Amino acid sequence: MCGIVGYIGPKPVVPVIVEGLRRLEYRGYDSAGIAVAGNSAGLELRRAPGKLVNLEAVIAANPISGTFGIGHTRWATHGRPTEENAHPHRDCTGSLVVVHNGIVENYLALKHELTARGHIFVTETDTEIIAHLIEQELADAAKNGKQNNGRHSERSEEPPHFANDATNIPLEEAVRRTVHRLTGAFAIGVLSAHEPNKLVAARMGPPAVIGLGDGEFFLASDVPGILHHTRNIHFLADGELAVLTPHGVTLTDFDGHPLHLKIQRIQWDPIQAEKAGYKHFMLKEINEQPRAIRDTTLGRISLDTGKVFLDNLQITEQEFKQATQISIAACGTSWHAGLAGKFMIERLARLPVDVDYASEYRYRDPISDPAAIGLLITQSGETADTIAAQRELIAKGSKTLAICNVVGSAVTREAQGTITTNAGPEIGVASTKAFTAQLTALFVLALHLAQVRGTITADQSLRLVDELSKVPSKVEDVLRSVDLQCQELAKVFHTANDFLFLGRGIHYPIALEGALKLKEISYIHAEGYPAGEMKHGPNALIDETLPVVTIATKDPNDPSSVLKYEKTLSNIQEVTARSGRVIAIAIEGDEEIKHLVEHTIQIPQAPELLLPILEVVPLQLLAYHIAVRRGCDVDQPRNLAKSVTVE
C-alpha cells in the first residue's frame, strides 16, 4: 500500500517522481503529493485527492522545480482522502516534510505532548506527528547548542519553529532520534529546505528500497517505481537509516553505527511492468502465467531423473525427515495457495500441514513445536501479518521457509531458505500469475519433501515431474480456448448480485480463489464453499438468479479423484433441482456433465494435484470479463492495496 519515490540527481525532479509514482499505482492509493526543494523558492508542495492525474493538473497550473524531491501516493489509514491529509506532511515551519507508509500506533500520546509544546497540527493523520517530532529534535538540539555556548536566554519555552535554521545536528540525527520514539510500522522519507540535496530514509516494517544510478540516487517503496532508472537496488532492512546525497548513499542502523550497502542487481526487464498492448495489467498477467510457471520450475526439476533440486536451504534433509508438521501462514490469495499446498504436501510427503491466516496466527497462542517447519507464502515478502507470523514461528523455535516473488524482501531475509516464484512484477492488485506460480512452487516443495522422506518412488517422481513440465503448455491451451467463452458468459452473468463457487478436496481452495477474484474486481458478492457442505446451509441461497460455479474435474487414474467427481455431480444435481444456474469447470471430453449443467468450461487433463493450476485460469478470466463489462477499475479495485504493510 502507498507509494514513495524520492530523487537526487541531474534530471528534472518532478517528471522522475511523478513517473515513478505512476509505476507504483498498482499498490492502491486515494491521494497524491510531491515536495521539491533546492531552488530560490525554498520547499514547495503540491497535493491532490484522487488519482495522479489530479496532482498533474495541480502541477501544470502551478509548476514547481528543484534539485531534489520526494513524492507519495497515499492509501488512507488515518484521515479522509483529502488534499489536507495527502502526503507529504510539513512541520510548523513548512521547511521540512515527511512521507510515510505504515501506522504510528502511539501517535495520539505524541500529539498531546507536542501540542503542549506549542506545535500546531493541521491534518487528521498520524504521519504529521513524525514531521513535528523531527522539528522538535532539531529545535531541542539548537537550544542545547546555545546553552553550551553560553548564549541561552532565560526563556526556555521558545517556540520550536524559531530554531529550525540554527540547528547544530544534521537532519539524519534528528530522524534517528525520532524513530526511537515511534511505535508501530513505518517507512519514511524526509527532506529539509535547510539541508540541500539530502534525502533521509528509515524503515521499520513496510518496504523501502534505495536505487543507485550513475550520479543519481533514488528512494522508493517498491522496485518498479525506479526500475526504469536503475537495476542496482539495496533493500532497506528493519532498523536501517539511509542518507542520500549527490555524492552517494550512507547507511547506518538507528543507533548510528555504519552499515554496508548490500546491492542486488534486479533481473526484471522494465518492459515486464508495462501493459505490452493489453487493455489491463491483470489481463497481461493472466496471459503471462505459462512463462511464470516455467520460470518457477526452471533449474529445480530434472526430466531425466525426476529429482527436485532446492538449493540454498538452511534446513537439512535430516531436519525435513524429522519434521513433525509444516505450519503454513499466509494472507488472501497466498492463503488459498497454502490450502492447496496442504493437499499436495500431505498426499505426497505424508507430513501433517496446518494452514493459518497470518493475521490470526500469533493471536491464537499457537503451541510451540521446534520440530515443526514454518512456511510463509507471500507475493511481496513485505506483508505485515505474514512477517509477524514468521517471527512468532521463529520465537517458538521453528525454522522457516518462504515462497516469495521478491528476492531480498523482509520475509526472505529472515527465512532459512526461499523458493522464489520468478513471476516477475505483478502490477494488478488482484493476484493471478503470482498465485499459479505459488501453486507451482508448492508442488515442487511437496515433491522435494516426498523424495527426502522416501514417501514416493523414483518412478512416481519421474512421472509427476514430467506432468509438471507439461503444465505451462496446457495453461496456454486454456488461455486460447476459454477466453471468448468467458467473455460470452460475462454478458449473461455480469448483472448478478451474488455468485457461489463450489469445490471438493484440493479444488475447494480454487473455489475460494475464484470467489475472491470476482469480489475483488467486480464488487459482486461471491462465496467459495466446500461442495459437500451444500446441504448444511448454502442450499437455502439457491434460486433461478444464483450462478453457481462448480469445479467438477477428475483424474481418471486417481480413484479418490473419481470419487470426489461423482459426489460433485450429485451436488450439481442439488443445485439444478432448485433452478440454480451452473457453470461447470470440467475436463475435456467429459460428455456426462454437459447434460447436467447450463454452461461447461473445459480444461486439459492433468494429475489431481496439478489440476488447480489449470482450473483457476478460467475463473480469473471470468472475473476479469465480468468486471470489465461492469465498468470497474480492474487493476486498482476500490479500497484495496497490492501490498498490505500494516495490520
Image (spheres, rainbow, N blue to C red):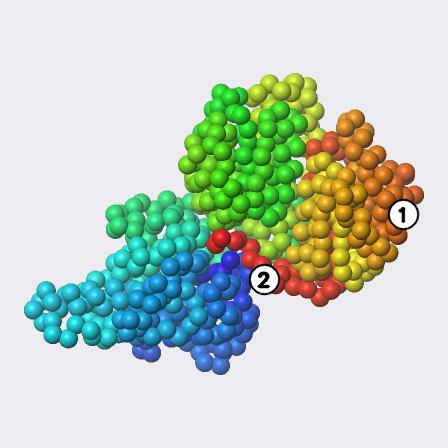
Relative to 513, does residue 248 appear above or below in the rendering?
below
Relative to 22, does residue 348 appear above or below in the rendering?
above
Identified at 71% across, 47% down, the residue is 528
Identified at 90% across, 44% down, the residue is 596
First of labels 1, 2 by sequence position: 1
- Foreground of the two, 294 or 214: 294
Identified at 75% across, 41% down, the residue is 533
Residue type beneath disc 1:
Ala
Element class at badge 2: loop
Relative to 476, does residue 105 appear above or below in the rendering?
below
Residue 351 in the image, given as x and y percentages of width and height: 59, 26
Q: Which mark is residue 639?
A: 2
Q: Which residue is mark 1?
A: 577
Q: Which mark is residue 25?
A: none
Residue 77 in the image, given as x and y percentages of width and height: 49, 62
Cα–Cα gap, marks 1 and 2: 38 Å
- Foreground of the two, 11 or 400: 400
Left or right of residue 159: residue 615: right
Residue 493 in the image, given as x and y percentages of width and height: 80, 58
* Residue 14 in sight here: no
Residue 506 in the image, given as x and y percentages of width and height: 70, 36
Residue type beneath disc 2:
Asn
Determine crowd level at label 2: few under 14, some 14-19, many 20+ residues with C-alpha closer than 10 A: few
Where on the picture, by quarter, is residue 556? top right
Determine crowd level at label 1: few under 14, some 14-19, many 20+ residues with C-alpha closer than 10 A: few
